[in-house]
């Protein structure tokens, strides 16, 4: 496993967000540096007091809801607690949505631009969800 793993989360589906969070938590627990960049449809799940439920894309998403699988938000928080993963909000998406830092959940480490994300991700692996 690389020393640095960067996750680019743009999807709004429950399955993709769940997989991203599972990868982040597992990699962080294994000692890998993890950076999560939340943009496009993924960012809305981290707006304080407004986070909608992620829609299921298929059967697996519906099963996760029925069986009360820990939410992707909970798993991202575990990634931070277990291994110091860092979660950032895309500054462009924040501008488009009219969001300020204070409107994001406390698990978000702040805004970040794409240039900075790609610079910080260099030398490691980037996965897109």
Image: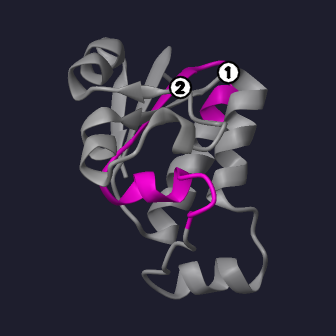
Label 1: few (<14), some (14–19) or many (≥20) C-alpha neighbours in 10 Å: some
**Spatial distance from mark 1 to mark 2, Cα to Cα?**
8 Å
Q: Is residue 121 left or right of residue 81?
A: left
Tell me the element at label 1. loop
Which corner quadrant of the image does residue 84 belong to? top right
Q: Are the residues tagged 1 and 2 within 8 Å (C-beta)?
A: yes
Its colouring scheme is one colour
Which corner quadrant of the image does residue 52 belong to? bottom right
The residue where tag 2 is placed is 34
Q: Residue 129, how many percent across, how many down? A: 37, 52
Q: Is residue 52 depicted above or below 74 in this figure?
A: below
Count the marks: 2
Q: Residue at x 75, y 39 (%)?
A: 78
Q: Residue 71, how many percent across, how many down? A: 69, 62
Boundaries of the magenta span: 26-51
Q: Residue furthest left?
A: 115
Q: Is residue 126 depicted above or below 33 in this figure?
A: below
* Nearer to me, 49 or 75: 49
Tell me the element at label 2. strand
Q: Earlier in the sequence, mark 1 or mark 2?
A: 2
Which corner quadrant of the image does residue 103 belong to? top right
Query: Tag on residue 84?
Result: 1
Label 2: few (<14), some (14–19) or many (≥20) C-alpha neighbours in 10 Å: many
Q: Residue 63, how many percent across, how many down? A: 65, 84
Q: Residue at x 62, y 49 (%)?
A: 22
Q: Is residue 108 left or right of residue 122?
A: right
Q: Is residue 52 left or right of residue 126?
A: right
Inspect the magenta stretch and tell me whether residue 109 lies in it. Answer: no
Inspect the magenta stretch and tell me whether residue 27 lies in it. Answer: yes
Q: Residue at x 42, y 81 (%)?
A: 57
Q: Residue 15, how many percent across, how many down? A: 50, 68
Q: Is residue 11 depicted above or below 94 in this figure?
A: below
């Amino acid at each position: 496993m690389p020393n640095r793993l960067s996750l680019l989360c743009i999807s709004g589906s429950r399955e993709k967000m769940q997989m991203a969070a599972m990868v982040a938590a597992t990699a962080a627990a294994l000692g890998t540096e993890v950076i999560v960049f939340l943009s496009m449809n993924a960012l809305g799940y981290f707006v304080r007091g407004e986070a909608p439920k992620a829609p299921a894309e298929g059967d697996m998403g519906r099963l996760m809801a029925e069986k009360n699988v820990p939410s992707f938000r909970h798993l991202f928080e575990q990634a931070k607690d277990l291994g110091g993963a860092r979660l950032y909000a895309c500054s462009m998406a924040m501008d488009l949505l009219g969001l300020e830092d204070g409107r994001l959940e406390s698990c978000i480490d702040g805004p970040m631009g794409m240039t900075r994300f790609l610079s910080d991700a260099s030398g490691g692996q980037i996965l897109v969800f």
